[in-house]
Amino acid sequence: MSRSARDTPMMRQYLGIKARHPDALLFYRMGDFYELFLKDAEQAAPILGIALTTRDRGKPDAVPMCGVPVHAASTYVKKLTDHGCRVAICEQVEDSRKTGGRRLVKREVIEVITPGLAGDPEGLDASREVAVAALWGGESGWGLAALDASTGNFRATAAPNAPGGLPGELLDELGRIAPREILICEDADAAQETLVREKLSHVSLTRIPAEGFRPGQAPCQPHGFDPHGRGAELCAAAGILHYVALQQPAALEQAPRLRCYGLGESMILDAATRRHLELFENALDRSRHGTLLDRIDEAVTPLGSRLLRRFLAYPLLDPAAIRERQDAVAWLADRDRARGRLRDALGGVRDLERTLARCIRPGAEPRDLAALRSSLEALPEVVETLSPSTSEPLPEPAEPLPEPAEPLPLRLPRTPEPLPFQLPRPLPTLCSLLTDALVEDPKALPRGSRGAGQTGFIREGFRPALDALREAARKGREWIVGLESRERDRLGVQSLRVRFHPVHGYSLEVSKAKLDRIPSDYERKQTLANAERFTTPELREMESRVLGANERAAALEREIFEEVRQAALAASTEIREAAEAVARIDVLQSLAEVARRDGWVRPQVDAGQRLEIRAGRHPVVEAMLTQRAAGEFVPNDATLDPDETRILLITGPNMSGKSTYLRQVALLVLLAQMGSFVPAEQARIGIVDRVFTRVGASDRLTEGESTFMVEMRETAEILAQASHRSLIILDEIGRGTSTFDGLSIAWAVAEYLHDTPGLGARTLFATHYHELADLARTREGVRNAHFEAREWRDDVVFLRRLVPGEASRSYGIQVARLAGLPSAVVARAQELLGELERGEIDAAGVPRLADPPLEASPTPQLALFGLGHEEDPVARAALDTLRAVDLDGTTPREAHALLAQLQERLQKEGAGS
């Protein structure tokens, strides 16, 4: 009776380990492959695009299986985690040679890789964080914590309770962090999960026990974490620490520092604003090309690229902190040669944060420490390029200076001015240890082996005991090589060869044609098709010495490697501090490089509310025009002030530059408050606490929301959350519905923004509703401006200049011609436009020359706000009556009676006129 395919020692071991990780795909190490079995294989194979096969094919209970090579595992693991899967890495934790083939080698899960807890950082996008976040709500409010385990960036914040559950500002912050996985309490209600999924639809949600959110029960206490604290942010941070301890306990060997921050420390940028302004992803293919981040990223290191992204995501609100960054950018921008040398020096610094993370992981290998060494070796050169002694030298005079008539007074040496940024502190002791211990270029080791059976990565001369073992092995191998020559001469068999097999060891190989010359002291060891392999007592003894020396040398190298690794981990705090300093310097030089190259200027940022930009330019559009040689960008001014121009109403034809201008102003504010210079001749920015944008049109069909519904939702959020320090960008409010409805909504929104006490937000309002220009006649804080355009032989020429006043025409037909509308359609549109402008329409608003005539409506419609029918005495009288009504003092019944009277009068007098 055949044994079940699932009742073998290997499958019993597999099922026992799988039972401890039921929610993860188990990567079970078997030699050079990770194998997946049963449901894990059926789930993973289609995601990875690999073949699904079976173990013990033909048996009724054959086991489905698939596998991936160990050397390429990181790529496959990333695919699975991108799909929201969890992967448990199960390694062989003992040498198979020690079992003698009599039992299975021991296997253990060394780490669990989740969507938010990255495995090998080498496969990650160097410019982006990969974060796991945790949410916790209690009586004291809500807490949010986030950890990028690949860099050690650990932070937490809190917000007060809100009537609807999760506070809106915390959801916005969650969207800004964009974690790949969110931890919530297993007792959390469905409403909380729904809110999170609405904000981040593709994120993985993981529920953990409530005990994991208790700070007093956290598995470790990193710097900045108070286990006795009662804040909600500490509870959220404890949830992350608890989760990491269960999934990747080695990652807490050097727990990262926790930084607690307030949501009010930086400008708030919600998801709509980040999307509309294309800060990190463009609207076309969601790539980085054509974004503001792409425009300003001249960072040399991955450290700098990640920090620059954080600078842009969190613009500052403190003018003093902004000026500190500006000082550093100005210092670097003024020193071209020093900045050039700095960029060269930074090129030698690798990703220190993620290199350290790899050294902490269980799969660390010698080349990780070598990469760490390489970065540490580059730090002194970074410091040297910025030290006062190597700052920009003064130019030499053309001629020798004349001797002074009188002795000059004695001058003491000038003390160098302090640098406007902190330099990284080199780690010479650790650097020397890594240099002395490791060879120049260690070879990559098989994943999970930690060097088992591998030698040659510890430098000769570092440890005498290791050198002695290597010498013994070397001499033994030389003796064996000499044995081949001696035996050839002794036996007269020139084809005799010394062979080595990983399992069978050393042997003497003789072809079958020469077997008659084999002496009696040869012992048969292995039979091949055309040859026999033999050993001798001397060869067996020397083989034992060589292999024993190699094995002991390999074990000693692993011990030395672990000692050196622990020494590096002991300096993890200093390494992280050096990485932070390098990242900051790299960001500052990046901003300086852009400012110097493109002629950007330092803006004045203060605590006032005036926003004034002279000759501002769109940073991205200008660069694209230059790249395409498509002409020069036309700069424009912008002035917003609650005491003067609170709302700037902008009109003009499509393609004239309205949308570009709106985004341009918002982007210059963001650049200024992140500490960057700006593309303008001059700029003064009164601190903006939040940028709101309602730009563009998009459906959310999967959520059952039309373009107009999305537009109205975003507008409602703006009106509910804006403050007197906000900057509001509105583009074509109301265009998603009928003309009169849209105009009415746009008018009411503008009035609300202007009239609401305590609001007074600085607002740019672009519109095609020219009627809105009348607001400037009744609202002192509203100003009109338009983009100039000129007609030329039935075409329109866009001048891209913003000038005061309202636009006289929309030039829609000319734009339609430029877009390629058929000439017959354009001609008919021009004919109809002429009729409408001459008033050649009937009482129902139908052109008299319509062909064929359209059926007229029985009742004429009054123009909105009385515009167009003021010459009709009946209409004028009705409007005068309406204007005189006291709306606040009129009851619904009185209003109904008044409307009935007006309707009766219009029907009688209108019919007779």
Image (cartoon, rainbow, N blue to C red):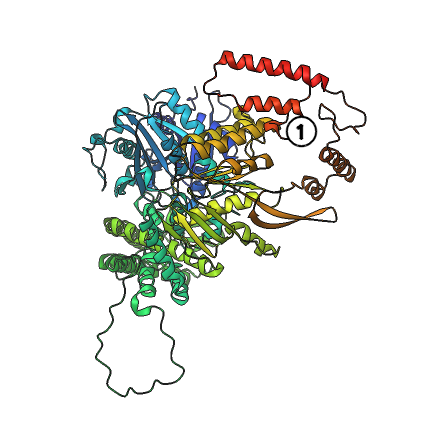
Q: Quadrant of the C terminus?
A: top right
Q: State left or right for residue 695 relative to residue 725.
A: right
Residue 39: x, y in percent?
45, 25
Q: Which image quadrant for residue 591?
A: bottom left
Up-down: is 187 above or below 121?
above
Residue 199: x, y in percent?
43, 30
Up-down: is 45 above or below 149?
above
Q: Quadrant of the N terminus?
A: top left
Q: Please tell me which residue lies in front, 599 or 293.
A: 599
Q: Which residue is mark 1?
A: 871
- Amino acid bearing label 1: Glu
Residue 126: x, y in percent?
42, 47
Secondary element at tag 1: loop
Q: Please tell me which residue lies in front, 821 or 286.
A: 821
Q: Residue at x 61, y 56 (%)?
A: 631
Query: Is residue 100 shown to the viewer in this render?
Result: no
Q: State left or right for residue 105 relative to residue 3.
A: left
